[in-house]
Image: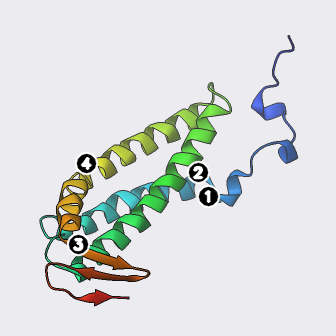
Amino acid sequence: MPTPLPRSKVKKNQTWNAESVFASSEAFDAEVKSFVKALATLKKFQGKLGEGPDTFIKAMKTLDRLSQRALKIRMYATLSSSVDTTDQQGTEMHGKATSALARFSAATSFVEPERSSALERRKHVDGSRMICAWDFTSIT
């Protein structure tokens, strides 16, 4: 069985395009810090998802934006550490990502129970319009 080449010896055009995700490891670090700071935006929704459709939708949009950022962080760090398990920088990035994603999980722990409770009040969904039982407000 052939021995795999060290990552440093693989031609650039035969590797995944890390720069398409983050321009550099410094850009990755900056995004992780920004992401962790942005988790505080979820606090204003805690205990309020059932207050009405406007709050619910704003919270879900905020959660979606943060989820997309979390996915990008996870993908970059996982691919960086997986392609060469001896790469200390990749291992360090994976650790930073894991920590940031654990914070994300903690910051969003209120969402599912509140969302389930709020959705129980949902009366009807018709295409892009949602009529909510708590105030029968239409949202398009």
Q: CA distance from mark 4 to mark 2?
A: 25 Å
Label 1 or label 3, whichever lies nearer to me, is 3
Q: Which label number is shown at residue 22?
A: 1
Residue 59's image quarter? Answer: bottom left
Q: Position of residue 97 (x, y in %)?
A: 45, 44
Residue 74 vertical position relative to residue 10 in the rendered view, above or below: below
In the rendered image, the vertical position of residue 27 relative to residue 80, given as above or below: below
Image coordinates for residue 87, horizontal then vertical, percent: 63, 30
Residue type at mark 3 is Arg
Q: Mark 4 = which residue?
A: 106
Residue holding disc 2: 25
Nearest-to-viewer mark from 2 and 3: 3
The amino acid at mark 4 is: Ala
**Residues marked 2 and 1 touching at CB (< 8 Å):** yes
Crowding near the residue tagged with mark 1, few <14, some 14–19, many ≥20 C-alpha atoms within 10 Å: some
Q: Nearer the viewer, mark 2 or mark 1?
A: 1
Residue wearing tag 3: 122
Name the residue located 67 percent from the left edge and 29 percent from the top edge: 84
Q: Residues within 10 Å of mark 2 (few under 14, many from 20)?
A: some
